[in-house]
Amino acid sequence: MESTKYDAKSFKGGLHPPDDFKHFTDKKAIEVCPLPEELIIPLSQHIGAPAKCLVKKGDEVKKGQVIAEPAGFVSLPIHASTSGTVKAVEMRLHPYGTDSMCVVIEPDGNDEWVDGLEGIDPEKATIDEIKAKISGAGVCGMGGAAFPTHVKLSPPDDKKIDKFLLNGVECEPFLTADHRLMLEQTDRMMDGIQLVKKVLGVDEACIGIEVNKPDAIDKCTEVGKSQGVKVTPLKLQYPQGCEKRLIDAETGREVPSGGLPMDVGVVVQNVGTVAAVSDAVREGKPFIERVVTISGAIVKEPKNLLVRIGTPMSFLIEQCGGLTEEAVKIIHGGPMMGNALPSLDAPVCRGTSGVLLFGKDMVRETKIGPCIRCGRCVSVCPVRLMPTTIYSAISYNEVEAAEEACANDCVECGCCGFVCPSNIPLVQAIRQAKNAIWAAKS
Amino acid sequence: MLTAIIAVGAVALFFAITLGLAAKKFHVEVDPRELAISEVLPGANCGGCGLPGCSAFAKGCVEGTIEITGCPPGGAGLVEKIAGILGVTADASEAEVAVVICQGDNVKAKNKYKYLGIEDCNAAQQIAGGPKTCPGGCMGLGTCQRVCPFDAIEITEDGLAVIDREKCTGCQKCVPACPRKCIVMAPISATTHVMCNSNDKGPAVKKYCTVGCIGCTLCKKKGSEEGYVIENFLARVDYEKKAEDINAGIEVCPTKCIRDFATEGYPEGSKLVMPNSVDQAS
Amino acid sequence: MENQIILSPSPHLESGESTQRVMLDVIIAMVPACIATVFFFGMPAVIVMAACTIFCVAAEWACNKIMKQPTTICDYSAALTGLLLAFNLPPSAPIWMCFVGAIFAIPMAKVIFGGLGYNTFNPALVARTALLISFPAQMTDWRAPGGFVTSAADLKSMATPLGELGTSLMLTGKIPESFDLAAYFLGNQAGCVGAASSLALLLGAVYMFYRKVITWETPVSFIGAAMVLSGLLWMINPETNANPIFHLFTGGMILGAFFMATDMVTSPLSSKGMLIFGAGCGILTILIRVYASFPEGVAFAILLMNSAVPIIDRYTKPTVFGTSAQKA
């Protein structure tokens, strides 16, 4: 790779997948996805309390209209992604796999904006006004966890923030949405960075980009030069896009176990998120669309699409020319941390970075073997856990032992499961351990 | 030779005295009733009483911190014995056994996907709600089987949990272990059960299961008004009612999801044999 | 089938490695040593290797059948154990001893512990040690390399270099004047079936490193510790102590360091743990060779350290990310 070109940084642990599968879409410009026949907008699209629904069956809604209001500080409003009629408010398949309450909208085709969406002049506005615009637009982290952005931008007074990092790592194989966004919408992203810098009161911002995206590194370095935005080239290493790994790679600071980046004076935002911040503040535009990578060897034309929230995945596949063979696995998100779905009926939500379709050759149906104690999971774990210890503890239902082995520190990056020769679903075991620990405490 | 005998004897004497003194000094008074109760308890340390083992239960009985009826595996016979030891009277409740109220194995009921992962119902439930389309159906991954301290649960080849009515002691460990709540407790004399746990409406059930309760209420209307309760599109047997009343519903059920274990035996695919089923049938 | 869709927990990509492949890689790595031993000891070595492998696989299969469990011989672990056991027997070992060895290795040392992944001790070494204690005469019936012969009777009796060292020390109080280290390195020495040729074993080790089946920690610390300790002893008194290179290329040092101590199941998980484990093996090997009544100590050293693995694992847990500041 091009690692010699840059003085690239990295972190300890993790792995280097032999193929990042990004070649399917990394040269494909973002296309705008047309309006589907039906939009399914889940009420729970972010970490925190689900939003409270404000519409009922038969209501007319306009594009950008608030259809559900936040239920608490760590919550966000949900907006209609187009104008039309509410067909139903019912349980539908959520992109995370289970059924959940969704507002189903039948578009009228006019795509009419609701009145009263106005931006503010960030030069004149106060920090609280900017934050209100960000939360009002429903902006949340676009990397996958979907944490409300305004919460991240409101550190308590005792935490002094001195570094603002941008996550342009996109370490998950297949995904190229952030890569294309950094290339094609550099100015929008830079504007968002300036706004967040103002909110946080920091002078410097750094974008971390892995060296497999040299075009994005060059473009961002050039544009960022005049705006006080630096680019840190990073070595290819999964899971560098995990917040704490990125902070480690860029600053060498170690976020304490159970702590947040703000504990070491850092705030991290995804590059897509800051672009959404720019729209929210300058134009008052709510977060109703995002870039999604549709990829996989069986997709006829893999693409990066600008998709309205609520668009069913089956519609996205149609836009990509369909499939060459029947899908055996449908994945929401990246292949390492994403979740598998039982059908393509699920919609795109705010945390959807990609939709991947795997055919037979990508799915190996091997049995789970006994752990042969090879120690590979231990050597790749970026959090320095012993995944196999947690696995054996939880197989014997020894919840305390699992807790002692720090199961709660696991970031579920999937490195251990990737390398395991016995095909043990270690991440699933650790997730079970986390549930058991939580259940034992409550 | 003599020295050796003396030396060994001295050592033996020393230890005998030390041990004797230690036994006196560290003597723990144990209530003889506690020992007596421990002896009659099943001794499987199943935890069904909520205490960490049978001896803890025995202690609790003597101290009065736990009801003497609190040992599910022991049943009525045990309650009588403990009552005798403690010199109290107790109303013995009827013993219960656990029943899996589902007979939709992987042949009879549909799966929405094929699950690859840890063989555990709770783990599978985390992945898009589990492979079985029916939200209440048994997934057959054996979580209940592994928690059962009495080895009373069988998983059939087609993936259905079946509880051995002879081995089951009613300890209830399997009940909370099932993420789909399809194990219920029923009196041991009740042999007829509605073998379905789906609260979906009839057409929905028909789509994914050939032996599910469709909430048609025929068991109640044509069978017996008394014997059945229907809630959320699901019939269930009122175990307090007479057996004739309940059995009247079996014939009329269109999906054959009411099963009398005494005459029909265990669900298809199970290798278990109902005790005395031949006698009762004849 | 309509249920074609598969759902599984993340990650949805995998390295493509399998236990089977790992075992097969180790067997492949043993091929050069197999060829070398046939070259030096002929048919007797072939018979021992074939017998041990077949008996071990058969024992595993029989255990599966008796316990009504799915057959596990396809993971090649039993075949690997068999071959390793053969490598640890003298070429003159009779077939019945291979059979007894297989009984020690598979049912006793592996299956009753819970099968692959649960055994505390390296099965091949347990079998070798059990045989050594049960049948000391046959297990120390060493033969000189005699080229491709058809039966063990054609091979002349000869002491192993370590045995020679011991005899010489006992008789004269001094070690022999000189050793033919080059011959030992190539494999021209009396010894176990697989342990003779360090060169062939090292070739196999290179393959295992290439396939990432083993990591550097255990072999490096094993050999390093053994070299340092034997080096110290040699410097103190070169008349009664052999030089470190002699220790390296004789007996089962190379076989032990690269093939036996690196057995994943019976060695620690973390890299720090592997370093401690390897060093322990190295030190114990030299101590046994120099001070104990057995001329060779690799097997005992590894078995002793196997028993220490749980405690090593316990005390070498990696510091979880984000907790180092709290501990300091």
Image (tube, helix red, strand yellow):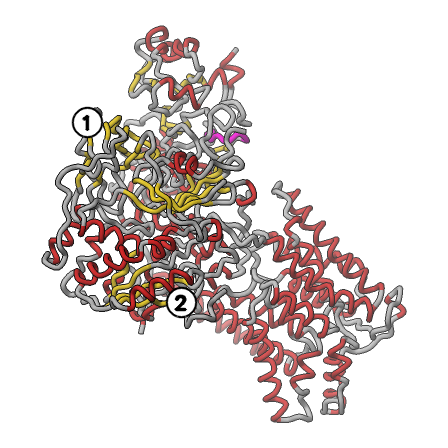
Measured as percent of width and height from the top left, residue A234 is found at 40, 66
C249 vs A160, nearest the viewer: A160
From which residue to which does the magenta span run?
Answer: B157-163
Tell me the SS state at disc 1: loop
Q: Can residue A85 be seen in this view?
A: yes
Residue at the location (42% across, 63% down)? A214
Measured as percent of width and height from the top left, residue C280 is found at 55, 75
Examine the rendered structure and indicate whether residue B159 appears above or below residue A142. Answer: above
Examine the rendered structure and indicate whether residue A63 appears above or below residue B282. Answer: below
Number of the label disc, if any, that sits on residue A59: 1
Residue at the location (46% across, 19% down)? B210
For disc 1, the chain is A
Q: Is residue B280 magenta?
A: no
Measured as percent of width and height from the top left, residue C146 is found at 86, 73
Say few, some or many: other residues with alpha carbon within 10 Å of mark 2 (under 14 / 14 to 19 / 20 or more): many
Q: Does the magenta stretch include residue B159?
A: yes
Inspect the image, locate mark 2, and give the three-letter code of the amino acid beneath it: Phe
Say few, some or many: other residues with alpha carbon within 10 Å of mark 1 (under 14 / 14 to 19 / 20 or more): few
A102 vs C290, nearest the viewer: A102
Inspect the image, locate mark 1, and give the three-letter code of the amino acid beneath it: Asp
In the displayed structure image, the side of residue A156 where residue A344 appears, left or right: right
Q: Quadrant of residue A123?
A: bottom left
For disc 2, the chain is A
Number of the label disc, if any, that sits on residue A11: 2
Measured as percent of width and height from the top left, residue B165 is found at 45, 27
Q: Do labels 2 and 1 share a chain?
A: yes
